[in-house]
Image: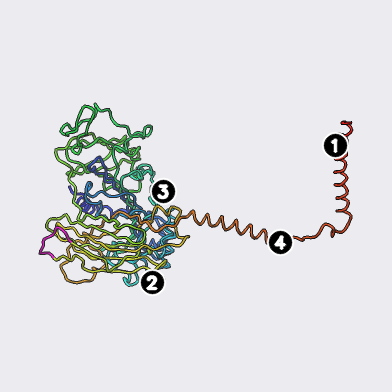
Amino acid sequence: MLLFSFVLSLTILLTSWVEASDYHEQLLLRPLPQSALLAAFNFRSNTTATAFEEQNFRYFPRSLGQILQHTHTKELHLRFALGRWDAEAWGARPRGGHREGGTGVELWAWIDAATDEEANARWLTLTNALSGLFCASMNFIDSTKTIRPVSTFQQEGDHSRTSPENLHLLHGALPHEVVCTENLTPFLKLLPCKGKAGISSLLDGHKLFDASWQTMAIDVRPVCPADGSECLLEIDQTVDMVLDIERSMRPSHDPIPRPLPIENIKCNTSKPYNGPDTCFPEDQTGVLPAWSLKEVYGRPIRGSCPLTDDSAPTVILEVPEGRDVRGESAESFTQSREGNLRLYQLPKNADFDLTLREQSLDSSLSLEQPPVYASRTFTGQGQERGGMLAVLTNPSPSTAVSVIYLESLPWFMKPYLHTLQASISGSDPNVAMNPLDSVFYRPSIDRQRGTHLELALTIPAASTVTLTYAFEKAILRYTEYPPDANRGFDVAPAIIRVLPFPSTSNSTSLPPQSYQEGSTYLRTTSLLLPLPTPDFSMPYNVIILTSTVIAMGFGSVFNLLVRRFVGADEVEGPGLAGLKARVKGRIQALLARFGGGGEKKHQ
């Protein structure tokens, strides 16, 4: 069963349950190839618009709600992400990429404001407040890291009862931000059970940040029912991670991986270099490893959160129908099966664990194919200029896709727009060779704003689109370099929105930024840009040498100015004469003692 279609159908199935409850949580577990495990946590709560305006919070976190009220933020999307999603091995991204963020911290929001200046001021207040709430460096998202996307992001909430002309979309990213436990702790404090019960009890920083890929997302949006009743303000918190099962189950007392004895390894004897002292292990793709929640996370689920909805399943396990699965708990729990899905309702006051035994499969796991494969890298050499290369591949053999490609570049990376080229390879020769439909470009201003580049592209079926352009590197001031300047500067990932239907019109304008069902998102990896870096030891040497010369020169001049030079005979008073007489007498005494005594002894 395909992951995205499963999540979509499951969301439709649970819509009535979620709307009937103020708080709902759910955990999806899905084994992936190469001994990987996808764990997708979802926590959803809501409050009415009237209660929100009156600050009558129940399950909606007050700390975040007051920030949204003060900054007039109508819709908020915040991401903390680490690692890289391996689309070739793991397939399509979970949730269609809607809850995925770029490396580091990513934030975008719709703010209600009358003018652009007022929106920028409220955006600055929002970033500073969220920085303190989540112990992150979002206060560094200034005007140089902020853009206003045109068509990449879509509104998830219902803003039909709000003036659309007063909503301003602003986006900022910090690819250099290191996500750690300091960000997870405030995230858990927003939940009603605070990570003490329910599926949130599995969220431990040691496991989360040891994952191959992980992302934490917070989404706040208005939801207005179609019957015209009062709107709700909904907060959706998600944590998606891909764990290495073997690495996670390594015992804490022996964390160093050790190879198995060669007699316990199944060797592939078909290899030509196989020998008695050489072993190439057989591929274990057809074997599902044994694991349990307690072994993977180091603890079982601490019962159910008493505030969650009891009518919907809390834990969903997606495994083949013949897989041996056993649930363990001191109390009774509800379980059911729907095809490849195992649905579990957690017990109230007892721990819950899932145990899966090792099993061989006749065929490999079915994975959903992503709509587009994307990669991005730097080209060129030298410290003055460089180039960007982005490769977008459409794996579908029959359907073309339309995408929006967004790049937010720092101001010290100055692209040459006239060098932008888009070429197609591997397509039908009858297809037009220009995949570029439209371009939105906002140039940078030194130390004021970055470059905003947004492209509308059409990728034919079974084809690859290659984007290239050249850029120039700026030279920063001495104080603008970080302490680790020789490491390089992080460039935010490119954001790609895959539209649900291919564009059939000849219009060169970008599509409107309205919500469209079926859109998916993916992000490339961040890049490391080396800039011309001075030798920071030379300023130190210059300062030391200059200070020494100034000290010597100033000391000599100061002595000449304040010291008074006089002759010995010009000194008034008996002090000097008496000193001279005492010194002279002492010298005569020494001469008389040694000189006179020697002559007497000789006689």
Instruction: Choose mark 3 or mark 4, whichever is in front.
Output: 4
Q: Position of residue 521 (x, y in %)?
A: 25, 57
- SS for tag 1? helix
Choose between 471 and 176: the one closer to the eye: 471
Question: Label 3: which residue?
Answer: 185
Q: Earlier in the sequence, mark 1 or mark 4?
A: 4
**Residue 469 sits inside the magenta stretch:** no
Q: Main secondary structure of the magenta part?
A: loop
- SS for tag 4? helix
Question: Image point 31% across, 70% down: which residue?
Answer: 164
Res 269 seen here:
yes
Q: State the separation of the CA atoms marked 1 and 4.
A: 43 Å
Choose between 371 and 217: the one closer to the eye: 371
Question: Label 4: which residue?
Answer: 560
Residue 295, image quadrant: top left
**Residue flagged by tag 1: what amino acid is it?**
Phe
Q: Earlier in the sequence, mark 2 or mark 1?
A: 2
Q: Check whether the beta carbons of the residues at disc 2 and disc 3 lie within 8 A of each other.
A: no
Instruction: Choose mark 1 or mark 4, whichever is in front.
Output: 1
Q: Position of residue 325 (x, y in %)?
A: 23, 36
Magenta span of residues: 424-431
- SS for tag 3? helix
Q: Earlier in the sequence, mark 3 or mark 4?
A: 3
Instruction: Choose mark 3 or mark 1, whichever is in front.
Output: 1
Question: Label 2: which residue?
Answer: 116
Question: Image point 80% across, 60% down: which residue?
Answer: 566
Question: Label 1: which residue?
Answer: 594
Location of residue 278 with respect to 51 vertically, above or below:
above
Choose between 291 and 235: the one closer to the eye: 291
Q: State the separation of the CA atoms marked 2 and 1.
A: 101 Å
Density class for disc 3 (Cα within 10 Å; few <14, some 14-19, many ≥20) is some
Q: Earlier in the sequence, mark 2 or mark 4?
A: 2
